[in-house]
Image: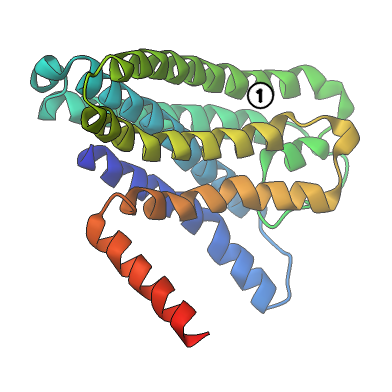
Amino acid sequence: MFFFLLNLALSDLGSIYTTVPKAMHNSLWDTRDISYSGCATQVFFFAFFMSAEFALLTVMCYDRYVSICKPLHYGTLLGSRACAHMAAAAWASGFLYSLLHTANTFSLPLCHGNVLGQFFCEVPQILKLSCSHSNFRKICISLLGVCLGFGCFVFIVFSYVQIFRAVLRIPSEQGRHKAFSTCLPHLVVVSLFLSTAFFAYLKPPSISSPSLDLALSVLYSVVPPALNPLIYSLRNQELKNGLRKIIKNDFQKQ
């Protein structure tokens, strides 16, 4: 689990570093310019890190499934070599998806200006600038991401159904609590990631507005990577004790 958490932290750091520094630079220098190659690079790396993160979350779900449902086989099924191969497969799938996604997006002719309504180069905003006769390719780009995401989502749901069934059969309350505590951070991270991304990309056009699109972009591109370290760190007892001490001191000062 800690090996996968290291990879998850790297993907979070990469996705934040892809969008936030450029947005901060534009805000501080009061500019909105980005080159065409810079925009393509930003789309590629953002898609790479976000898709790799989703693949890693799926792999981590399998890790939780094996540790709870097949604990005696954990060392055999998830040895160091198997974990390295699974992490490498997650990164490789993210790279291939982002390469295909970026190449397909930027091969579309842009006929409706060059102004994006976001603080970073986001694929839906770029597709709005493309010509109307390329609707089929727009749909293909969207369907590819939806199909891959839905496949991972089905796997995660199926795994957690098996996990919860196994946990509920544990006779002791302490054992059930320990099992749930190992799954809860992962489940929270997956729910936060999927809910924000799905709503941002699959919301009805009737409720779309520039301010709402901007808020949703921040919600799914910045908030989950920023909160993931905190969510997993709360399993650390020393960190929880430190937070309680800080909150207690704040209340005493007030």
Residue 147 visible in the picture:
yes
Q: Residue at (40%, 49%) from the top-left corner? A: 231
Residue 114 visible in the picture:
no
- Residue 40 against residue 34 in the figure, above or below: above
Q: Position of residue 205 (x, y in %)?
A: 86, 32
Q: Position of residue 222 (x, y in %)?
A: 56, 53
What amino acid is at disc 1? Ile
Q: Secondary structure at mark 1?
A: helix
Residue 128, quarter of picture: top right
Q: Position of residue 107 (x, y in %)?
A: 68, 31
- Lateral position of residue 55 relative to residue 193, left or right: left
Q: Circle 1 is placed at which residue position?
A: 141
Q: Position of residue 140 (x, y in %)?
A: 68, 18
Q: Nearer the viewer, residue 232 or 9?
A: 232
Q: Nearer the viewer, residue 28 or 228?
A: 228
Q: Nearer the viewer, residue 165 or 202?
A: 165
- Residue 7 against residue 233 in the figure, above or below: above
- Residue 26 against residue 183 in the figure, above or below: below
- Lateral position of residue 209 relative to residue 17, left or right: right
Q: Where, quadrant-wise, is the N terminus in this rendering? A: top left
Q: Residue at (47%, 50%) from the top-left corner? A: 225
- Residue 78 against residue 43 in the figure, above or below: above
